[in-house]
Image (spheres, rainbow, N blue to C red):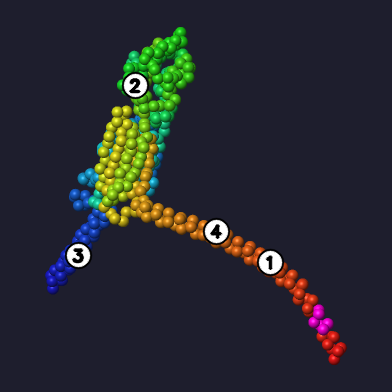
Amino acid sequence: MDKDRHTEAEQRLSQMRQSRGGQTQRSDTAYRKRLSRTGAAADPSGERPCQVQVTVPRHSEYATVGEFFKMECPVTYCAQRPNVTWCKYSGQNCLPLEIGPQQHTGWEDKVHGSVFTLHFEPVYPSDVGSYSCSVNFNSVVINSNIIALRVKESRCSGVDWNQMTQSSSLPMTEINTTLFVQMGAKALLCCPALPMTEAVLIMWVIALRGQPPCRISYRAEIKEINETNCTDKRITWASTPDQSPDLQINAVALGHDGLYSCEIATLQGNFQRRHDLQVLVPPTVTLLPGENRTAVCEATAGKPAAQIFWSPDGDHVTKQESHSNGTVTVRSSYHWEQNNVSAVFCFVSHPTGNQTLPIELNQGVTSTLHSLLTILYVKLSLLGIILLILGFVFFLKRNYFSSQLTGKVCAVAKSSLFPQLFFIPRLSLNKGAQA
């Protein structure tokens, strides 16, 4: 009897364990499904879940025009690396960046995890704006917080004179910079930051594209300036060479594109600074509608080549045409499939500034209706004025005839009616007396 009771208890305990195991298995399956919807994945061992995360706090970063700069997007993932992209905000839309020579992306492995980077080589003035990275994992898109990039113009700067003379063991210290200047703006070309009392000789070598080099020298001891093959009078000293060795260009032209090198000879050694001056030319942007749901957006004669994006999404073909002066024309033909599209937008990105051009697809109907309403309004206004004038004339004529008729009636009454009235009673009295 005790044996039977013991066997029955063991069977009940085994059933309870199996029931709990089934509930645990079902809850684990549901939990894994929830993780997959929220951008998480199960660990291959099946014990611990792996959460895909983008850890980018909302912050601002600062860069200088002409320097190389990178933006980081830390991503935590499991065994399989997810698809990560960068975009830049234009209004409320975050437009995907077109990867090219100036901007490129890549992965970097660090101690605390992997980082997906966006490189600016170099930084342009128009790179200022708001950026975001996004991860696409198991059809779930995870967007990062916004990174605001602040871009400041490059100015004359250099290594301190004491640092150069104490720490530099080289006979010549070189500084290489890239200078981006928009056509028509002023450019300042700087020499190494040295005290003028230390300078013995200042030598500028200007190598414009397709021209022989121009040489400008200044000997501090005798205050003598010599120029060789220098014909462009727009390139002048920023001050006087005994006060500042820097050069300036008041209005940069496309022909000023080239290399500018300043070398200062001192008793401690030679110091050099090179500028790669690149002239930026803003393109002329046009957007023309075509037939059968097509449009053409063109950025003409820009330097460097502009980038063109479309909204809403559709098929587009972009071609470039290079010109002899270094400018490039970009032409993008766009086609959309939807019939219910009310507007098409062309976004043009360029270092000199971004532009957005819209096409209202019902613009022709709206314009025609507006024109018809305007014409109708004008006609009704003219009709109202004419009716007002006619009414005023009629009123004047009516008053005139009324006054004339009243005068005549009064005249008749005075001449004939009133004497008869006075005469009638008199006759009546006479008749009464005779009776």
Mark nearer the viewer, 3 or 2: 2
**Please, is residue 141 above or below residue 266 in the view?**
below
What amino acid is found at the position of numbered circle 4 in the picture?
Ile
Observer-side mark, 2 or 4, equals 4
Question: Cα distance, mark 3 to mark 4?
Answer: 94 Å
Which residue bears the numbered disc 2?
Answer: 208
Query: Of the residues under marks 3 and 2, which one precedes in the sequence?
Result: 3
Q: Give coordinates of residue 426: x percent, y percent.
A: 83, 82
Q: Position of residue 125 (x, y in %)?
A: 39, 34
Q: Residue at x 49, y 56 (%)?
A: 378
The residue type indicated by label 3 comes to Ser
Q: Residue tagged by mark 1?
A: 404
Give the extent of the magenta segment: 422-427
Above or below, 419 against 48 in this view is below
Question: Which image quadrant: the C terminus?
Answer: bottom right
Mark 3 residue element: helix
> Mark 1–mark 4 contact, CB under 8 Å?
no
Quadrant of res 56: top left
Residue lying furthest bottom in this view?
435
